[in-house]
Image (cartoon, helix red, strand yellow):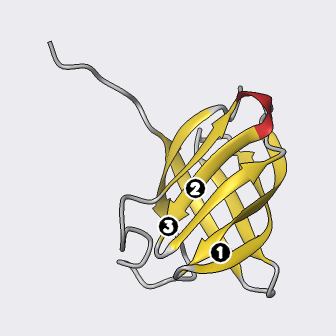
Amino acid sequence: MSLLGRWRITEMPDDVEDYPDMMEPAYILFEDHGSGEFAFGCVTGQIFGGGDADAVAFSWTGNDEMDDAQGDGRAELQPDGSLKGQICFQSGDEANFIARRETSSTAC
């Protein structure tokens, strides 16, 4: 199964409960050609080096509370269909997450 698509970050075990959705609903997106993006709390980032697999490692650049930030990360599909991963900051901080694939629906 592929990680491609948008995933809703539903848990960040190391953060207070309302932090992930502070600015917008927390998510991570993996697109074709090893690109993507994510947002949680006051952090946003552009992903480089993801891919179409069941586990990926990537680097990222973006911002944290409007300060430039960068680092790396990883994500792996779990047997229950969830996505478990970690976004690491160059400063040494880490953000662990669990996400569920977003399903799109269209109104008629």
Residue drawn 36% across the image and 74% down it:
22
Q: Residues within 10 Å of mark 1 (few under 14, many from 20)?
A: some
Q: Tell me the kind of residue under disc 3.
A: Phe
Q: How far apart are the alpha carbons under marks 3 and 1?
A: 10 Å
Residues at badges 3 and 2 in contact (C-beta under 8 Å)?
yes
Q: Which of disc 2 and disc 1 is earlier in sequence?
A: 2
Q: Seen in the image, is 59 located left or right of residue 21?
A: right
Q: Residue furthest left?
A: 108
Q: How far apart are the alpha carbons under marks 1 and 2?
A: 12 Å
Residue drawn 66% across the image and 39% down it:
30
Q: How far apart are the alpha carbons under marks 3 and 2?
A: 7 Å
Q: Seen in the image, is 77 located left or right of residue 92?
A: left
Q: Tell me the kind of residue under disc 1.
A: Ala
**Callout 3: helix, strand or loop?**
strand
Q: Residues within 10 Å of mark 3 (few under 14, many from 20)?
A: many
Residues at badges 3 and 1 in contact (C-beta under 8 Å)?
yes
Of 56 and 37, the residue lying toward us: 37
Residue drawn 81% across the image and 86% down it:
92
Q: Seen in the image, is 94 located left or right of residue 63?
A: right
Q: Tell me the kind of residue under disc 2.
A: Phe
Residue 13, horizontal then vertical, whole percent = 55, 76
Residue 32, horizontal then vertical, whole percent = 72, 27
Residue 47, horizontal then vertical, whole percent = 72, 51
Residue 76, horizontal then vertical, whole percent = 75, 48
Q: Is residue 101 above or below residue 108?
A: below
Residue that badge 2 annotates: 38
Residue 96 falls in image quadrant: bottom right
Image quadrant where one finds the N terminus: top right
Q: Nearer the viewer, mark 1 or mark 2?
A: 2
Which labelled disc corresponds to residue 40? 3
**Callout 2: helix, strand or loop?**
strand
